Image (spheres, coloured by chain):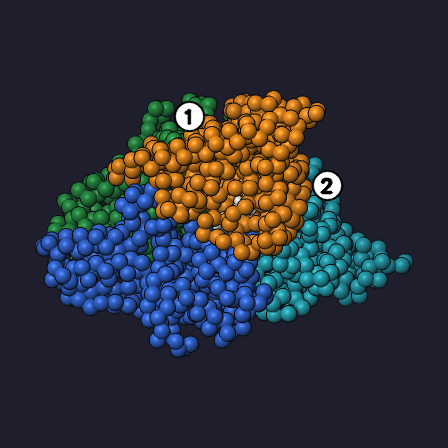
Chain colours: A cyan, B orange, C green, D blue
Amino acid sequence: MESKLRELLSDAELLGFYEQMVLSREFEESCAEQYTKGHITGFLHLYSGQEAVAVGTTAGLQKEDYILSAYRDHAQAIVRGADPNRVMAELFGKATGICKGKGGSMHLFDPKLNFMGGYAIVAGQFPIAVGLAFAAKLKQEERIVTCFFGDGSMNQGNFHEALNWSRVWDLPVLYICENNFYGIGTVVQRASALPALHRRTCGYDIPSEKVDGMDVIAVYEAVKRAAAWIRERQRPYFIEAVTYRFRGHSMADPATYRSSAEQEIWRSRDPIPNFAKRLIDEGITDQAALDEIDARCTARVEEAVRFAEESPWPEDSAVWEDIYV
Amino acid sequence: MESKLRELLSDAELLGFYEQMVLSREFEESCAEQYTKGHITGFLHLYSGQEAVAVGTTAGLQKEDYILSAYRDHAQAIVRGADPNRVMAELFGKATGICKGKGGSMHLFDPKLNFMGGYAIVAGQFPIAVGLAFAAKLKQEERIVTCFFGDGSMNQGNFHEALNWSRVWDLPVLYICENNFYGIGTVVQRASALPALHRRTCGYDIPSEKVDGMDVIAVYEAVKRAAAWIRERQRPYFIEAVTYRFRGHSMADPATYRSSAEQEIWRSRDPIPNFAKRLIDEGITDQAALDEIDARCTARVEEAVRFAEESPWPEDSAVWEDIYV
Amino acid sequence: MSEMTYRDALNLALKEEMRRDPRVITFGEDVALYEGSFKVTRGLLAEFGEDRVRDSPISENTIAGVAIGAAMGGMRPVAELMTINFALLAMDQLINHMAKVRYMFGGQVFLPMVVRMPSGGGSQLAAQHSQSLETYFMHCPGMRIAYPATPADAKGLLKTAIRDDNPVVFIEHEILYNSKGEVPEDPEFLVPFGVCNVMREGTDVTIVGYGRMAVLSLMAAAELEKEGISCEVIDLRTLNPLDEATFLKSAARTGRAVVVEECWRTAGLGADIACRIFENCFDRLLAPVKRVSGLDVPMPYSRKLEKLCIPSVAGIVEAVREVMAASY
Amino acid sequence: MSEMTYRDALNLALKEEMRRDPRVITFGEDVALYEGSFKVTRGLLAEFGEDRVRDSPISENTIAGVAIGAAMGGMRPVAELMTINFALLAMDQLINHMAKVRYMFGGQVFLPMVVRMPSGGGSQLAAQHSQSLETYFMHCPGMRIAYPATPADAKGLLKTAIRDDNPVVFIEHEILYNSKGEVPEDPEFLVPFGVCNVMREGTDVTIVGYGRMAVLSLMAAAELEKEGISCEVIDLRTLNPLDEATFLKSAARTGRAVVVEECWRTAGLGADIACRIFENCFDRLLAPVKRVSGLDVPMPYSRKLEKLCIPSVAGIVEAVREVMAASY
Ligand SMILES: Cc1ncc(C[n+]2csc(CCOP(=O)(O)OP(=O)(O)O)c2C)c(N)n1
Ligand SMILES: Cc1ncc(C[n+]2csc(CCOP(=O)(O)OP(=O)(O)O)c2C)c(N)n1
Ligand SMILES: [Mg+2]
Ligand SMILES: [Mg+2]
């Protein structure tokens, strides 16, 4: 059988997409368990269901491109290359955490990966992304800035100011809206005057498109095209990735505001088994190989938990460090 | 000769428009003089050139409709019916001022006229307008809320939040953008991603139109139509009135960023002489009658200055009053 | 009287006031269908309907501004900001507008509105979600500020806030939501603004706190009693109006005082409280007033570090001991 | 040395630093073509071009946030907020982000950025345009705060701010822009952060001020000298870091202190300064420390009323006389 996927990507790359999605999912589900056990505290917002967006987007970018996110940031960081051990240790509040245990779940950061942070104030990342794009442009770097955000964040003033500013100054920003239809318990139609979110950019003369956020290949292709467009023209672009979170907003949310019918439809669109099926259907791999990947991911996450458990707590003196240079 | 104007309005109404524009202009030019003399202090933003917007808009509304504005608010208050004496006294900082001398030029307010204030924080009036509209809707009143603002204010987050919110909740707000092309010294193209400002509402599913803000009749007709539309549908509407301020941003601004060619074009579009000519051309009045109106306005403003001059200063004790109920 | 949680007491206050006065409305992010992030608005949508209980877009500055406008238009809005941290997105409407309009418009308007906001640290929510920003509000004239420490006060102060014709910033402590206490059932039970709650009388030292800090102070006093130290514990209840007379009189009597604030120490409101005691009781003080404060650091996530940053019972006990030891 | 205005000293500091370091850029509302609302950025666009000197849309929160991002990206931005009042629209980026990111990201990033903001009352700009909000910044850990009183400090502190690797809130007083003084020409002239300026030495009483309040204090000291009262006048220069040692030593020596703050008195930073003196010099004080503060009211427009709201030379003189009269 002839494979469309192979026209786009190598087998290794395709299997890499699969592995990243599985690793993300395993990581999140393990976090849920650790939260229940009381090892992870505070707010915990899981990404299960949305993996195709992080994986497809990251694959469509260059390594030097900056990425910023909100508080639902584990998968985005790990897919970018963050060490799962250190991410899990961060969630445990340990000294070995990626931010020394000071940031926690909502504030992952790794400048070596150009992963410029998870921000917990809804829409707080927008102006920072614009500033990074300005710096990149002034320094005549090739890089673009990718800013992830949710449907709910688009109603903040920050969103508007950033879109306007990045177009007036013509800065290389790729806006990736993860439309999972809910801001906590509020469905998009009850919060946004124009629920067709990608059409919001008409007021800023910024081109935009909608993509199936449950299809890692669709996301990848859209982002790759958009990134090239931005790099060439040095102007912002907007992608709405339509997706769904399988869990509640955070661990505290039972998500009773969503019908089970709705949830089932979206469960049936789970990006992981669907992509697995496609890989098999197009003859790129077989179930045994995928099972092996799954097992590897499980082990990888188990190792991360072990690492986090065994890691030391920060010294008390750390409380006064990292405030000023 | 047949008159188009007479089909719309009575002679008295038409002459009223003229008188209101002249009164506004005279008032502003007198303020400039009083500022030079040191009687008026602080910031002074004059409205000269934009009179057709305030007069046309106010005429298109009902008395119970709320009006809010920014800091360039003298004419809007006076056209609505504020006593020029008390407005001038406010600018002098006298106890007889419309806000007891506490607000000054930027903060006129008269609840009896449903003139709900001039606000000096750019875009600060937007959410308050939305809140007033919500109250009006809840109380099932007939009134709508008219919110004046400048081109520059549309880049603030507040603008975006208000437009979105008023459409999601479907509130009776009439947005009147006074596009005079400048926010202080910054021309609209250098601040707004989409300089065709009325098109900005596309992202909120709010209908909009552009109107000649130097033509009092055009403004009047657009507002009247829009107000009826809003009252019936209980939904927001947006009008961009294209206009020009003849003076600098404030008395401190020599406005050197505008070419004299540009200024001359707009001076030739002065809403007052052009409307005067039309009134005469269509046989509604003659020059002598208009001269009489002019003289009456001059005298009215002179009286206001006299009243302000002769008014007492506030008592020192006033400083502690009006903070809490 | 019946025992209930701080959360339920707030909920009851809202319900009673909404029943009493149809002009009372509430809105904010997820307050209606979701019944509030902390479930304080549970049952309101069902009882009062969509007009009076509304979910808003995520637009904090506009939440505050819509409350201002609605209050101007004759309603009595109770807006919710999901937490006090997000009030930083609403400072324009809260400080530049809410606190100013009555004055700058010469007293021609008043704003009978309440802005509720859960506050405080201690739940490992890290730097952006654990702030105690009460100083920002107390510093600015033109608004009232209430901060209940007990379920009874939660009910009584919120009812007073809703009936007050001034704008009120109403701060609730996230960790107190589950705390329990006796709450009067009387729907006319009101706790007046500007009257401290002397939670415990004592003779050796005066401890002044507010919100959760008052609760911790009370616990510290119980410990200190075992050491024979008699503490008078005063809960400010409202930061504006500030009932200075009560704590000044107490400090003048005991000659020693400890001020407990959850916020950052530098330029925090505790300095003002302490300063008032120093200024007014200078010749009666037997020792310098001590401040127990939040550490001057952004809040760390790790629970091990976070614990160091927030005043604790042990820290208050220690401060009291020091104040007792010092003698001039 | 040459005589120049505070405005020109700031302008010179910007030019020198932009010449020295190509990473220094500046942007804000009307800073480029219009050369700044207060003309502090005069000549910058002409000399450094559009890339480095940019007009922004009216979007204060984004101005602050773009500076954060640009600093993260390796630039050294100097952002201007047209006045401090508009910083209230940027509190989200300034307090929730600028002051937090280094800490919450475990020290992996630093923000070499400056946010300039003209401040203060006294020009009849009414309630929304006359605020003194320095307490809001001083209260929050994670940023430096400089507030020059003299042209020399204007230059030296701004240059230090630009070279500092921490975020700096740089407050300028609108009324001081035209004030004149000697300013060193040396392009390496820097005024270090965290070192008070003892503007005048004295033995009877210590006056602590900052910004325009330091200038008024110096004038008051000159008047008081005629009465035989010897005042030591200390300008804090930077509110963070705070050089507590200098003013504590002075107050311990004189035994009397007056703290002058332009901001509102309640929960204002002056209470913290006074409190530190009370706490540390308790047994050396001959009289309670006095605060001279802005009145706790929204600023009225009318010049007759406005004058009552802002500390004046006469008010400082009066406070010093009272402190001298009181003796315990
Ligand atoms: C300024 C601000 N307001 C409110 C919140 C509380 N909050 C956290 S997440 C959230 C919903 C955001 O929804 P969306 O942007 O769609 O992102 P999603 O959670 O779906 O990924 C809200 C209201 C916050 N963190 N910051
Ligand atoms: C939040 C805020 N930022 C900046 C200013 C300073 N400022 C006053 S008016 C103005 C320009 C506004 O332009 P526009 O909205 O077009 O109104 P116009 O003056 O043309 O009537 C600016 C930047 C302010 N008052 N408030
Ligand atoms: Mg969402
Ligand atoms: Mg304009």
Q: Position of residue D277 (x, y in %)?
A: 22, 59
In the rendered view, tell whether residue D204 sits above or below residue C147: below
**For the point 35% across and 33% down, which residue is it?**
B307
**In the rendered structure, which amino acid carries the disc numbered 2?**
Ile
Q: Quadrant of residue A4?
A: bottom right
Report the disc number at residue C16: 1
Label 2 environment density (alpha carbons within 10 Å; few <14, some 14–19, many ≥20): few
Residue B139 left/right relative to C163: right
Asked if the residue at label 1 sits under 8 Å from ligand 1, the reply is: no
Mark 1: secondary structure: helix
Residue furthest toward the front? Answer: B288
Residue B87 left/right relative to C274: right
Can residue C82 be seen here?
no
Name the residue beneath numbered marker 2: A265
**For the point 26% across and 39% down, which residue is it?**
B316
Mark 2: secondary structure: helix
Give the letter of the chain under mark 2. A
The one of A99 and C219 positioned closer to us in this rendering:
A99
